[in-house]
Image (cartoon, rainbow, N blue to C red):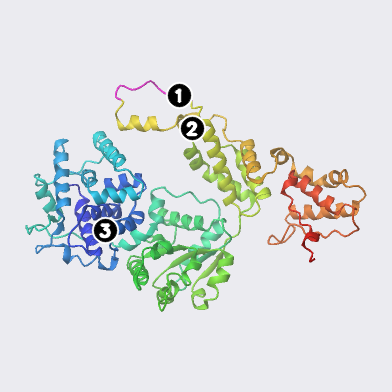
Amino acid sequence: MSSPTPNLIELAGRDAAAFGLNHVTPVVMLLSITRQGQSDAAQILAHFDVDSRGLLPVVEGVLGVRHNIALSTQTKNVRNEEGKVIFSNELYKAYEQANKQAEAQGKDYSQTPHLLLCILEDRQVAAALSRLSVPAEAVVEVIHTYLQAGTLQERPKPTTAGAGRKQLETAGGVPEGDTANGAQPLPPASKTPTLDTFGRDLTKLAREGKLDRLVGREKEVNRSIRILGRRTKNNPLLAGDPGVGKTAIAEGIATRIAEGKVPACLKDRRLVQIELATLVAGTKYRGEFEERILLVVKEAKENNVLLFIDELHTLVGGGGSSGGLDASNILKPALSRGELTIMGATTVDEFRKHFQKDAALNRRFQEVGVEAATVPETIEIIKGLRPALEKHHGLLIGDDAIEAAALLSDRYIGERQLPDKAIDLIDEAASSLALDRESFRPVALLAAPPAKPDTLLQRVLRSVPVSRLLTGPANSGRQPDLLYRHVSALVSEITGVPAGEMEKDERVKLLGMEEAMGKKVVGQEAAIKAVCQAVRRARANLRDPNRPAGCFLFLGPTGVGKTQVARVLQLIRTGNIKDLVRFDMSEYMER
């Protein structure tokens, strides 16, 4: 069996002990494969979005018992007298079958995909995958494709090649009821199993290039890094409105750590994102949540891990039960002693509503304000994300489309913050254009069918849309596909504002408001001038951003044009009179 397998068997033994079993079953082995995350089999499962976080509650449901991480170190119940991990008869047969399949393919040793292929026949494994909406047949097809194409890395031959039993003993496992001698167990595959299960390693993702590049926000990133480098109270708290980029700042710090562009005290540290909801999920009995929190704290302290908690305000009261402690009270001692470092993110309103009332917890965090990005900053942020968006959608994005996304979202989508709403706008516009073009793919531009159509490379090439192949470096001179008109059409669809109104120069519209309104409302020059000046001040940002752009009270006898001024103002500003909400208070009078 390939080199990751001994550690995999050791981890499977720990998982079996955590479930209270006296041997390792195929479905437990499936969970251990995802938890290890280093083998080819784990990569195949990840291709179907099967990871330990999603699989764990499913396996608990299949087995009918919960996974108690605190028991994972007590593996004596799943070992024989010689210290070997005990396999169930079903898993041992699958292990032997994996070696037979490898031998039939001309390999001197089996690999983790062979084992995964054989345990897929187990009833509990099939049930677990079915609950995740993953057809076992599709996984089998992918494994066969990998094995036939020879894409798995060849590893050194074992010193003793033989039957599956000999390899199993060498790896550290024996069948259920067997007491054969074997090698001593190897150390566990991971020092942080709880963090691996309930967390998301941002520094690892940054090294693998799976995080979007952070553009701008130098002030907030540098301030957060300075706080993390403090000896005490080194817990930064990112506070800002939803959509301003708090999580992106945390990912940017993880990228800096991965690249070594941080002070020496942070270079060897990991930044792991923890979601409180995943820790609470599946806890049925009193003390389970507290147990998980303490394990997270223990692993973070012992392995120099920084924790990032989004929606930090959920700590206050999070997981608390009648007579029990909530998450904040469990973390306070470690925070006060400086043994644990946490980076948090929350909105300003939630911070004031839930977090600030706990003064003891509040003083341990240093607030870092995160303001909404300006339109020029948003344009630069989207330009930084453009390569990833173009690769995903398979088309080229023009500069005018990026500028339109920033300007139009700022002008017409008022309930959300930049840069989030602009990024969503350009992403959806690109998705809409790619969907429209998918029906007209230039199939004739494909090369002639190769001589061997069954290789993995040719399958991948055939599965990639031609539009993606046409966006490579050789086509860098092509005209952009996504333009201003595509973005304005989407904004019109979302807001109801006619696309023609968006294409007009807003400065011309603002300066000519008096003339335009005067054509429809006659004899009210003073009122029209006051309204237009207020609108121009609002568009020039000469107002409190947390207050309405304008609040007008029209006074006068019946029939002079008070309601008409409001209607004309709405028509000129948005071009759509239907968006005016009219309340006639005479209809609410008491009778």
Query: Tag 3's secondary structure?
Result: helix
The C terminus lies in which quarter of the figure? Answer: bottom right
Q: Quadrant of residue 427?
A: top right
Q: Nearer the viewer, residue 340 or 466?
A: 466
Point 73% across, 40% down: residue: 501
Q: Quadrant of residue 587?
A: bottom right
Point 29% across, 28% down: residue: 454
Please rate how many residues cluster around mark 2, counting C-alpha atoms within 10 Å: few if below 14, some from 14 to 19, many from 20.
some
567 with respect to 313 (left or right): right
Residue at the spot of label 1: 443
Residue at the spot of label 2: 471
Front label number (3 vs 1):
3
State yes or no: residue 450 in magenta: yes
Q: Residue 278: which disc?
A: none
State yes or no: residue 26 in magenta: no
Please tell me whether residue 221 is drawn above or below residue 514 in the rendered image.
Answer: below
Residue 157 appears anywhere in the view: no
Front label number (2 vs 3):
3
Mark 3: amino acid: Leu
Please tell me whether residue 376 is drawn above or below residue 551 in the rendered image.
Answer: above
Point 48% across, 67% down: residue: 314
Q: Position of residue 319 (x, y in %)?
A: 42, 70
Q: Earlier in the sequence, mark 2 or mark 3?
A: 3
Q: Position of residue 244 (x, y in %)?
A: 57, 56
Mark 2: amino acid: Thr
The residue furthest left is 180
Cβ atoms at labels 2 and 3 below 8 Å apart: no
Residue extent of the magenta highlight = 442-452
Distance from disc 3 to disc 1, alpha carbons, whole Å, reads 49 Å
